[in-house]
């Protein structure tokens, strides 16, 4: 009976989410193919990202059908359209990502990747809209979603670990060399197809008996684990934090001290813990918990007011950045939600996700979104600082060379922060009127600008030594194509399975239970030189063995001595 129910749930899940399963197969197949052809380029990663977006889109219609009061003709049409729309979404989003520079910056990443959290929030808002004021259903649905994701990932990891362990056992016990690609094949199968399918099927099975629509409610029964965590762990912690914030608020009122910036992050953590407490104790209906919830929501408002003051002071001093914009919107969300939660206690869960979705949409894609407001604010702040320093725009070579004092540091960091977060074309036009043509690289542009403006030494740590840390990194595939012969050897071992360990520049390893070692001291200078050559392994050939080293770190000290780290990767060939 249980076996029949198991396969019945899988069949129902496949019928309800056919396109989602098809996309999971697509993701698994693409990942497996990329592993097989040894390609892990940016365009392949972009295709996987686009596939994940399509997967999320494909869930909208089936979830609507799963929870709607009646499966009307309109709902069936919406279901089919959204599922079919998921396929061109993959192609369109992939094409969009292909047009991006490989060195996009913070503002651009928000624009193109903010769709993921927004889509997830949109799905949760849709479910809340279907159930309207039936908070028990919304709570059960979200709990089931969390369980689905958690159990799905856990199932994928367990299967991946189990299959990998089995392969490792075969390799170790029977001296069979197994290509490491098989571990990656199992990983893609487990974490895409198996985990994704498990999430979908688990959610559809546990919500099968959940009354549809908003006309009927059902009685909740919280699990013992949730009661323990909610009542005995999160609730006491929330009360402790509440006591600390209350004492700090009294200190501010009495002494007039400025709230510290860290209050923003502590307040965010307190709100998160408080909402977890509310969520985990949601099924508790006693007057005690009703009172605790009211205290929590009132305290959220009071803590948010302290956060506003701290944020206001930073904005006055340094202007609005993208992160400060998000913090401000989050504080607005805390206050708005808390006030509405006190006034409308039967709509708290629906209000929470709906407000979060709405403010996220405004922050990411409205005309007054985070990147736009931050760009305007930081531009004005830079112009103000430049005016104080008697420097005019556009900036010229060595414009900051003669700057001194505290203002120099603030101006430098503001300009560099502007450079590191805003798109290349916009920041180049504002700062240099397109007269500077540096590389569009998020990693190098910072240093190029410092050098161009004559501020390359600002805020750098003094050189305490001339020790050089080096890394040898090599592609561990296609040895024959690199001219490395393997035919003359009987066996090839992955060093990982020989328990390698480096001590005092001596490599110790084990083959069939026998401990062996090789002194790497004569090769240290060659290893250091090889680490400067990108993509090339280091070869050590002896009478009956050959070491192909693909990963090795070390340090060359100021006195010329070289010390290798204790970890190594590569292959050992024996005759």
Image (spheres, helix red, strand yellow):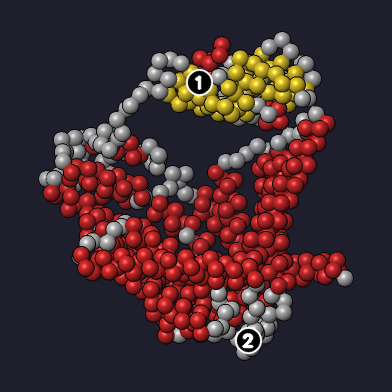
Mark 1 lies on a secondary structure that is strand
Location of residue 520 in the rendering, given as x and y in whole percent from the top left corner:
59, 16
Quarter assignment of residue 139: bottom right
| Pointer 2 residue | 217
Q: Is residue 11 visible in this depiction of the protein?
A: no
Q: Label for residue 74? A: none
Residue found 66% across the figure and 65% down from its top: 148
Location of residue 226 in the rendering, given as x and y in whole percent from the top left corner:
60, 69
Q: Is residue 454 above or below residue 217?
A: above
Relative to 357, is 330 on the left or the right? Answer: left
Q: Residue furthest bottom?
A: 215
Residue found 17% across the figure and 45% down from its top: 407
| Pointer 1 residue | 563
Mark 2 lies on a secondary structure that is loop
Quarter assignment of residue 173: top right
How far is disc 1 from disc 2 in space, using C-alphas? 68 Å
Q: Quadrant of the C terminus?
A: top right
Location of residue 71 in the rendering, given as x and y in whole percent from the top left corner:
68, 83
Location of residue 91 in the rendering, given as x and y in whole percent from the top left corner:
59, 56
Q: Quadrant of the N terminus?
A: bottom right
The earlier-in-sequence mark between 1 and 2 is 2
454 vs 80, nearest the viewer: 454
Relative to 530, is 317 on the left or the right? Answer: left
Q: Is residue 447 visible in this depiction of the protein?
A: yes
Relative to 494, is 1 on the left or the right? Answer: right
């Amino acid at each position: 009976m249980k076996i029949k129910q198991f396969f019945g749930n899988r069949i129902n899940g496949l019928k309800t989410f056919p396109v989602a399963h098809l996309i999971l197969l697509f993701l698994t197949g693409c990942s497996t193919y990329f592993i097989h052809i040894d390609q892990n380029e940016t365009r392949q990663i972009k295709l996987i990202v686009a596939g994940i977006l399509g997967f999320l889109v494909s869930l909208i219609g089936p979830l609507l059908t799963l929870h709607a009061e009646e499966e009307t003709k309109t709902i069936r049409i919406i279901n089919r359209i959204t599922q079919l729309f998921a396929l061109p979404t993959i192609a369109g989003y992939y094409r969009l990502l292909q047009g991006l520079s490989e060195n996009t910056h913070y503002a651009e990443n928000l624009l193109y990747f903010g769709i993921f959290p927004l889509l997830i929030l949109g799905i949760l808002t849709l479910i809340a809209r279907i159930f309207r004021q039936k908070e028990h259903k919304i709570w059960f649905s979200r709990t089931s979603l969390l369980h689905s994701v958690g159990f799905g990932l856990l199932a994928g990891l367990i299967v991946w670990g189990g299959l990998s362990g089995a392969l490792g056992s075969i390799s170790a016990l029977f001296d069979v060399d197994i290509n490491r690609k098989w571990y990656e094949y199992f990983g893609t199968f487990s974490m895409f197809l198996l985990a994704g399918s498990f999430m979908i099927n688990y959610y559809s099975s546990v919500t099968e008996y959940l009354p549809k629509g908003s006309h009927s409610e059902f009685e909740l029964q919280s699990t013992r684990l949730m009661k323990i965590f909610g009542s005995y762990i999160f609730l006491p912690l929330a009360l402790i934090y509440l006591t600390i914030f209350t004492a700090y608020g009294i200190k501010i009122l009495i002494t007039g001290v400025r709230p510290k910036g860290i209050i923003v992050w502590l307040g965010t953590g307190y709100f998160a813990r408080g909402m977890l407490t509310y969520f985990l104790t949601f099924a508790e209906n006693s007057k005690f918990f009703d009172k605790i919830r009211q205290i929590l929501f009132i305290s959220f408002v009071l803590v948010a007011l302290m956060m506003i003051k701290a944020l206001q002071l930073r904005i006055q001093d340094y202007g609005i950045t993208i992160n400060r914009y998000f913090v401000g919107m989050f504080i607005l969300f805390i206050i708005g939600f808390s006030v509405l939660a006190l006034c409308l206690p039967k709509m708290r869960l629906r209000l929470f996700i709906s407000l979060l979705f709405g403010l996220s949409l405004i922050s990411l894609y409205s005309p007054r979104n985070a990147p736009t407001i931050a760009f305007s604010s930081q531009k004005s702040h830079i112009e103000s600082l430049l005016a104080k320093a008697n420097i005019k725009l556009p900036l010229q070579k060595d414009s900051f060379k003669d700057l001194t004092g505290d203002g120099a540091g603030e101006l430098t960091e503001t300009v560099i922060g502007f450079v590191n977060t805003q798109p290349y074309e916009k920041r180049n036009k504002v700062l240099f009127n397109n007269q500077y043509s540096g590389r569009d690289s998020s990693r190098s542009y910072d240093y190029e600008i410092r050098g161009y403006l004559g501020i390359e030494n600002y805020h750098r740590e003094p050189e305490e030594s001339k020790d050089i840390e080096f890394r040898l990194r090599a592609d561990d595939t296609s040895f024959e194509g690199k001219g490395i012969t393997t035919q003359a050897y009987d066996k090839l071992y992955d060093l990982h399975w020989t328990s390698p360990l480096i001590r005092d520049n001596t490599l110790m390893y084990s083959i069939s239970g026998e401990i062996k070692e090789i002194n790497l001291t004569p090769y240290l200078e060659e290893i250091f030189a090889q680490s400067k050559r990108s993509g090339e392994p280091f070869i050590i050939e002896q009478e009956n063995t050959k070491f192909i080293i693909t990963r090795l770190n070390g340090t060359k000290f100021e006195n010329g001595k070289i010390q290798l780290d204790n970890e190594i990767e590569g292959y050992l060939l024996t005759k």
